[in-house]
Image (cartoon, rainbow, N blue to C red):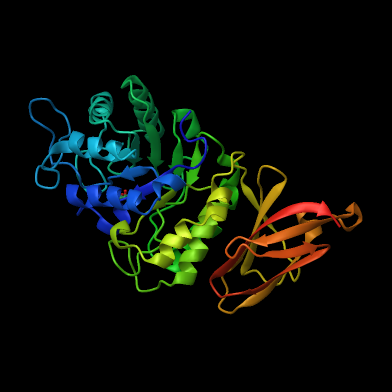
């Protein structure tokens, strides 16, 4: 089964937009291996919109790669990616044209799925632009779900529909579905994505995951969706929340020049373990002491092996000590149990706590993430 845990990899869109080419893709694949990211689970190299010619081949009717951007064709790219032990992803659209106005797959689903299978594609990101008003979007996604299966190749189906497919993505054969509009590289953008997710938690499970969009971690003001509102703290917060929410980890920065700090962040084994936990349970949002503080969220997530993950997300404009009452998580005072709490960033064990826990000094727009075990106390 594909997507037992949230898919991980890189997608070209956030940095390169439609200005994508063979050199960038192959160099990125090399960078993934050079930094050991493949060993951590980052496997998919996904070329987003802008890879094809503006029109289909007049004879075969197939979508064809842009000969300038991809001079050796897509099998060359695919073979190279596969030779490194990575997986190859491509983009198309359920409508008549893609969002960037390249040919879409509507009414060509079976031919296009076969073309992608012939390229050796392992993932299809399938967008929802240029769908005529009288056409049912759900039907178009069902069609591509079947066309991919009919191609004879196992292809991960990544639905990109905005906030409408949660309840039907899985039944169309989808392995991940976007639940948001497009991210940009600012705190405001990913905070709004995060705060819109409470009602989506129930839809993620092995086989099909809620996709909160590609990460902007490490963009540092460069690339298509960049802004000037970025910081290392904000990137730590974003990455940790994507891990807590079991969302696919699709990196969006230019991995060829990733900073050491960001490499360390996306390689954090505890955060990755939280994201890739085999049970893939969603988090819930817990209350905290001092209910007047509405701008700090606490997320609690069951992991396998009697472990839990807890995140304290401070989206206010000042730092805060964030108080929790452990009974909010289900651990009563009378149970004779406490929580042994370990910082996911530093690896430091903070001790065993009963009744209360205070996440100390959570920075503005920052986060603290802990793993916890229930122990006798
Ligand atoms: C939409 C998607 C983006 C990207 C672009 C490509 O906006 O949400 O992730 O794929 O289309 O044009």
Left or right: 313 with respect to 219?
right
Left or right: 370 with respect to 250?
right
Residue beneath the point at 22% across and 52% down:
24
> Picture coordinates of residue 259 (x, y %)?
37, 66
Q: Give above or below for 119 relative to 31.
A: above
Q: Quadrant of residue 35?
A: bottom left
Residue beneath the point at 34% across and 33% down:
122
> Picture coordinates of residue 108 (x, y %)?
24, 28
Q: Give above or below for 320 relative to 128.
A: below
Residue beneath the point at 23% across and 26% down:
118
Q: Quadrant of residue 345?
A: bottom right
Left or right: 156 with respect to 13?
right
Q: Is residue 331 visible?
A: no
Q: In the rendered view of the protein, which quadrant contains the C terminus?
A: bottom right
Q: Nearer the viewer, residue 279 or 115?
A: 279
Q: Quadrant of residue 86?
A: top left
> Picture coordinates of residue 326 (x, y %)?
79, 59
Counting the numbered discs, the total is 0
């Amino acid at each position: 089964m594909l997507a037992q845990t949230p898919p991980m990899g890189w997608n070209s869109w956030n940095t390169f937009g439609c200005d994508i080419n063979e050199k960038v893709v192959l160099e990125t694949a090399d960078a993934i291996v050079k930094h050991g990211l493949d060993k951590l689970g980052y496997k998919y190299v996904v070329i987003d919109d802008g890879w094809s010619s503006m029109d289909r081949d007049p004879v075969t009717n197939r979508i064809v790669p842009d000969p300038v951007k991809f001079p050796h064709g897509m099998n060359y790219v695919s073979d190279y990616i596969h030779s490194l032990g990575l997986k190859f992803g491509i983009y198309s659209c359920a409508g008549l044209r893609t969002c960037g106005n390249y040919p879409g797959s509507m009414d060509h689903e079976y031919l296009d799925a076969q073309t992608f299978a012939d390229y050796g594609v392992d993932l299809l990101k399938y967008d929802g632009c240029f769908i005529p008003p009288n056409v049912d979007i759900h039907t178009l996604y069902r069609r591509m779900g079947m066309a991919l299966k009919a191609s004879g190749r196992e292809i991960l189906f990544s639905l990109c529909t905005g906030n409408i497919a949660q309840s039907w993505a899985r039944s169309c054969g989808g392995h991940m579905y976007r639940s948001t509009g497009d991210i940009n590289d600012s705190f405001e953008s990913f905070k709004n994505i995060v705060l819109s997710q409470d009602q989506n938690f129930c839809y993620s499970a092995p086989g099909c995951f809620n996709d909160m969009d590609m990460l902007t971690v490490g963009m540092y003001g460069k690339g298509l969706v960049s802004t000037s509102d970025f910081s290392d703290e904000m990137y730590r917060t974003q990455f940790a929340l994507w891990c807590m929410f079991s969302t696919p980890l699709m990196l969006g920065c230019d991995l060829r020049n990733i900073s050491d700090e960001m490499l360390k962040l996306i390689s954090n084994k505890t955060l990755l373990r939280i994201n890739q936990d085999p049970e893939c349970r969603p988090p819930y949002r817990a209350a905290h002491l001092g209910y007047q503080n509405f701008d700090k969220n606490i997320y609690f997530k069951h992991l396998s092996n009697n472990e839990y993950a807890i995140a304290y997300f401070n989206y206010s404009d000042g730092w805060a000590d964030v108080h929790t009452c452990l009974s909010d998580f289900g651990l009563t005072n009378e149970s004779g149990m406490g929580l042994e709490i370990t910082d996911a960033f530093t690896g430091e064990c903070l001790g065993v706590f009963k009744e209360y826990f205070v996440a100390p000094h959570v920075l503005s727009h920052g986060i603290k993430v802990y793993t916890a075990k229930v122990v006798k106390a």
